[in-house]
Image: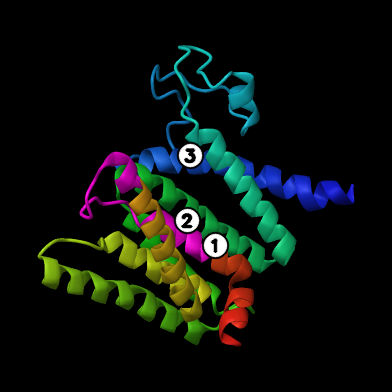
Amino acid sequence: MEIFVEYIIPFIFGSIVGSFLNVCIFRLPEGRSIVSPGSYCPNCHNSIKFYDNIPVLSFLLLGGKCRKCKHTIPIRYPIVEALAGLVSLALFLKFGLSLSYLTYLIFCFALIVVTFIDLQHRLIPDIISLPGIILGLIASIFLDEITTIDSLIGIAIGGGSLFLVAVGYHLFTKKEGMGGGDIKLLAMIGAFLGWKSVLLTIFIGSALGSLVGLTLMAIAGKDRTYAIPFGPFLATGAMVYLFWGDIIISYYLGW
């Protein structure tokens, strides 16, 4: 019973919310309601029955196809559901059932939505990042993991650093480099995790982005102007900091 409570329930809860995250990923870029109508097949537009909407399991039982029209269901759906479940489990093991668990669960869910929207549409919706900045600042009042001052500095450094990079890149190249969505996303990360997280997030995000970018350039035969979305790498860096940031910083800087 104890194992069920500690491992199974947090995963199931996260995967159920992950099903809703898929709705957000699908509808937010189109400016559509995430509440109504209910889940439906994007190909035949038939409503999806509850027994066909069980996270991960329904995808496997249906063979990755719509029951009605047999159209292929994007693999993104079970990936997001499983990822949300694993994140919920990891946060529960780290914080237990607490305000910190709920706060950082919302934060990570936002990062998941941002990641998949940015990968597909090359944009980060303000409806996620701007309220996220405010929520992160308010949460800092009640959480033990971060102070309000740390959150405010995180917002300033997070948004300000990428803004300066974007301005500098534009001045030297006369081209748009860093998008406004990335700037607001990093400000949101700073609001939830503090200013130290911004430094590590940029480092990890830039390293991963460079590695992936160079690999894609080599495979696709693109030049250095080939653009890749930066949001997923910032989100990855933020999650790394959330779970292992203190260990990494202490190891390298002795803080």
- Range of residues picked out in magenta: 216-238
Q: Residue 236: within the magenta?
A: yes
Q: Which residue is mark 1?
A: 239
The coloring applied to the image is: rainbow
Q: Looking at the image, which is closer to me, 95 or 253?
A: 253
Q: Residues within 10 Å of mark 2 (few under 14, many from 20)?
A: many
The quadrant in which the C terminus is found is bottom right
Give the residue drawn at x 32%, y 67%. 183
Q: Looking at the image, which is closer to me, 35 or 254?
A: 254
Give the residue drawn at x 47%, y 31%. 38
Give the residue drawn at x 33%, y 58%. 126
Mark 2 and mark 3 lie on one chain; the one further toward the N terminus is 3
Q: Residues within 10 Å of mark 1 (few under 14, many from 20)?
A: many
Q: Looking at the image, which is closer to me, 205 or 10?
A: 205
Q: Amino acid at mark 1?
A: Met
Residue 54 in the image, given as x and y percentages of width and height? 63, 30
Residue 254 in the image, given as x and y percentages of width and height? 61, 87
Q: Is residue 185 placed above or below 214 in the rendered structure?
A: below
Q: Secondary structure at mark 3?
A: helix
Q: Which residue is mark 3?
A: 22
> What's the distance in space between the residues labelled 2 and 1, CA to CA?
9 Å
Confirm whether residue 74 shows in the render.
Answer: yes
* Comparing labels 1 and 3, the label whose residue is closer to the camera: 1
Q: Is residue 64 placed above or below 223 in the rendered structure?
A: above
Instruction: Please say if the residues under marks 1 and 3 sit with CB atoms less than 8 Å apart.
Output: no
* Comparing labels 2 and 1, the label whose residue is closer to the camera: 1
Q: Which residue is mark 2?
A: 111
